[in-house]
Amino acid sequence: MTAARTINFTLNGMPVTADVKPHHNLVELLQMQFSLTGARESCGQGLCGCCTVLVDGRAVSGCLYLAVFVDGAEVTTVESLDTATTLSPVQEAFIETGAFQCGYCTPGFILMVGQLLDAHPDPDDHQIRHYLTGNLCRCATYPEVIEAVKLAAKKRKAAAPA
Amino acid sequence: MATTTMTGDQGTAKVGAQVGRSVPRLEARDKVTGRAEYTHTMRIPGMLTAKMFRSTVAHGRIKSVDTSAAKKLPGVFAVVTIEDVKKVIPDPYYGPAFHDQPILADGKVRFVGEPVAVVLAYDPHVADQAVQLITAEYEELPAVYDEVDALTSKVYVHDVLRPAGTFADLKHLKDAKDTNMALDYRLRRGDFDKAYAAAEHKFEHVFTTQKVLHLPFEPHATIADYKDTGVTLHTASQGPSFVRTEIARLLGWPENKVRIKVPYLGSGYGGKLYIKLEALALALSMIARRPVKVALTFEELFYQITKHPSTFRIKSGIDKNGKIVARKCEVYWNGGAYADIGPRVTQKSGLTASGPYDIDNVWIDSYAVYTNVTPAGALRGFGVPQLVWAYESHTDMIARELKLDPVEFRRKNIMREGRPHTTGQVLKDAACEQVMDTVLDRMKWSQPFDKGTGVVKRGRGFGIAIKAVITPTTSVAIVNVSADGSVTLYCGTIDMGQGSDTAMAQMVGEVLNIPTETVRVVPRDTDVTPYDMGTLGSRSLFHMGHAVKRAAEDARDKLKALAREVGEPEGSNTPIRELFVKRYGMQAGNVIGSGIFKPDYIPPAPGTGLSENVTAFWMVSGAGAEVEVDTETGHVKVTKLVNVVDVGKAINPKIVETQISGAALMQLGFTMFEKMHLDGGQVTNASLADYKIPGFHDVPVVMENLHVDTNQSNGPFGAKGVGEVATFCVSPAIANAIDDAVGVRLMDLPLNPEAVFRALRANAGKPLEDE
């Protein structure tokens, strides 16, 4: 096992430092050093989307992304959306449409749907299915997620300044 | 009732009529913020991580295990084999039906992937690396993989079978040797042989289902924290009460020294039932004398538990009027190397193997069989999807062969209310015809159907099924009213995504006339939450629902008594907290209601397997599918899927709909592509890259999920379970649709393009060579 290296990055808006070994992935870093468990390793192959994390605003699979690579980067996790006041439109839409069952894959979906709506503010069914192909839900709550995306799109529009 | 009205500080949600509301899930916020805690991501101070060294042979005697190099790796705390386990647990065998599974391989290995040794380390990467340094030598033995071969094979997976004797419905199991048969359930109604011999038309078909698995996205995980004064297990389990019983038995301890805690469960589908990693975690914590976490990787799920592959030989005799007069069902269940709950699957599904049809002469043999593959257990249907695959395909084939309308053929034979079911129990609250009619209506079955032209052909198919809920089982619940009037529910049902916490809270709210959102459901903890048999088989809403309702009613009655005691006039509107203040002089005290439910039951009679009261309720479901078959590639596209179930009264219609949809889509994967590939007992596709599951693009363009409006007369608020039902008919509905489209009949799952293309070529007289 090789030696650890110190990295500096921004985590949910806050500058942080961590000691990581070359083989540590981003999920391990977040869970072991910052007790953030919203990004979870499931398939371990970057195929299910449960470990989704935003690095410099772009969704990555935290189970494949080596921790050392976030040195100097901006890292955003689902926990960034957990504020004392309101939830994000995407989170509200997921609750209102019941777009989850066990909830294990949900944080990954929440982040990915946010990115989807940034790219396509008013997505159709095909765009939704295509964009979210990399997120799997073993409870198969797919129809509800499609409904949630559409509702979130409406909520975002309503909240946007005219 | 007036004394239980709560006012003011109870939140802003609507009061009254809690049952029947689509209340958003109570735990929703925790789940969308990523704050929900699951065992797999949980850590406790001082915890060691365990990594397993697994067998590479399917059946063999262990000649030696060399752990010396692993032990020398810096950072390794210990390397453990069964010899170490026996020092702390002298009889280290566990299981719900048989005590057949050793905590680690004991002298023999019985399937590829069986845990042989474990490395403990603080750093999981060190443990992983050390596992790579372990070697083992085996004397390979002949292995048996096929469920039919295993019944006559001289290769025995186990030398002796030791029944566990835990469950009321498995008390009849006996010690046995020189057999791979864990259980045979038999049903004999009328005289099959005579009726079949006399029948005008005779049909015999054999159907198989493949090995698939649950794949919960939270893989199995357990943390055991053993102390000589008591042990705590944090575990991803669907049945903490059973885990407690089994851990206490292994320790020789009273149950009150064993505490099982279950946080949020990243789904289960039957895969986290009974006892899985808990016994190993216990042993490791005893050896290490500190907390130990055992958590599977995704790949390891393929070596933990699967669905039963099955072979179903079905024979039917039909009279000249199109009435089924005789049916024989021989079902072989491939249970793998350890029985797990296979015997219960075999028996309980065996009850309804002849389908929702009124047949006077029925013969059912259902065999739970040991083989040298990953053990099999319950998966969303307790065996019933495998049966329905066969009997609804068979039913369709008969209708086609006799040139009868497949719907009218079923209608002529369907079991109706008030008639004795095959088991002898009179059918009640089983809306077979209503479900069938609703499917047909949504499929627009009576209208002309475009069969397609050119290379893409279209077809449609249908199926209907029945299931008997596992009986008898017990649930207990407690409702605690605090002195401020707030209400807490203690129940052992595990909400693994099916929304049970919300539904149970709705029942409490209904009885106490308070908003569902104000009811707190405490996390599962056997030190706190009372007994429940387990969250399985769609039993919870009915059984635990009754217990919860009774507990809430008990609390309500005690609140009324409290009001009388403090001199409130009948019908007074005094807030509850004031009753407590009047009684105790301050905000103090509790009112505690409790409820227990266990349905009546008559065990199947030895010999005939018949019983007039074998199940607490029936589940009915139907499905219709429209498909497009590409005749040049064998690709099948499901363009429409209609799922209809009888759930009695829906406690939470939105959650019911999600359950129907989720179950049907899961079964769509088992129908169209999911398959564990095995080569000489080795799983060759143990990863999500190689084992495909349904994603967004697999969802049919049109999907309708409905429940018929019925009332379960003996259910809590007229309700019954819904978790599994929508899986039952998806597979045969699609196979029947493929036959309708292109005239080929597939009798083995999955219905992947290769299978369809091979069948098309064979049908055209140009069969492809075998692989």
Image (spheres, helix red, strand yellow):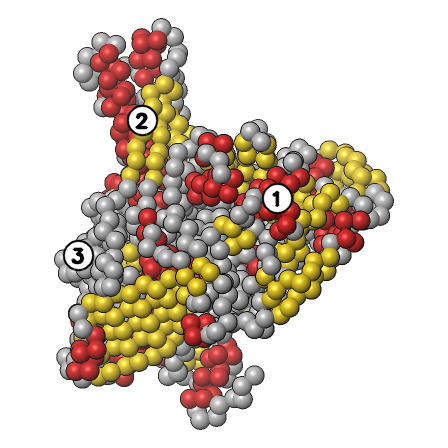
Q: Residue furthest bottom?
A: B765
Q: Give the percent coordinates (x, y) of residue B241.
A: 43, 40
Given the image, on which type of amino acid does mark 3 rest?
A: Val
Q: Does residue B428 appear left or right of residue B725 in this picture?
A: left
Distance from label 3 to label 2 (Cα)? 34 Å
At horizontal 59% and vertical 53% (from top left) the residue drawn is B104
Q: Disc 3 or 2, which lies upstream in sequence? A: 3
Query: Is B673 rendered above or below residue B514?
Result: below
Type of the residue with mark 1 = Lys
Q: Residues within 10 Å of mark 2 (few under 14, many from 20)?
A: many
Tell me the chain of label 2: B
In the image, are marks 1 and 2 on the same chain?
yes
Query: In the rendered view, does B626 fall on the left or right side of B713?
Result: right
Q: CA distance from mark 1 to mark 2?
A: 44 Å
Amino acid type, label 2: Gly
Label disc, if present, on residue B593 of the rendered structure: 2
Which of the pair B648/B195 is nearer the observer?
Answer: B195
Label 3, label 1: how far apart the Cα atoms are: 53 Å
Helix, strand or loop at disc 3? Answer: loop
Identify residue for label 1.
B87
Which of marks 1 and 3 precedes in the sequence?
1
- Where residue B207 sits in the image (x, y, percent)? 39, 75
* Label 3, residues with CA under 10 Å away: few <14, some 14-19, many ≥20: some
Which residue carries the number 3 mark? B426
Chain identity of mark 3 = B
- In the image, B156 versus B372, the foreground residue is B156
| Residues behind callouts 3 and 2 on a single chain | yes
Q: Earlier in the sequence, mark 1 or mark 2?
A: 1
**Residue located 38% across and 31% down the image:** B489
Discs 3 and 1 carry the same chain letter: yes
Residue B495 locus on image (x, y percent): 44, 42
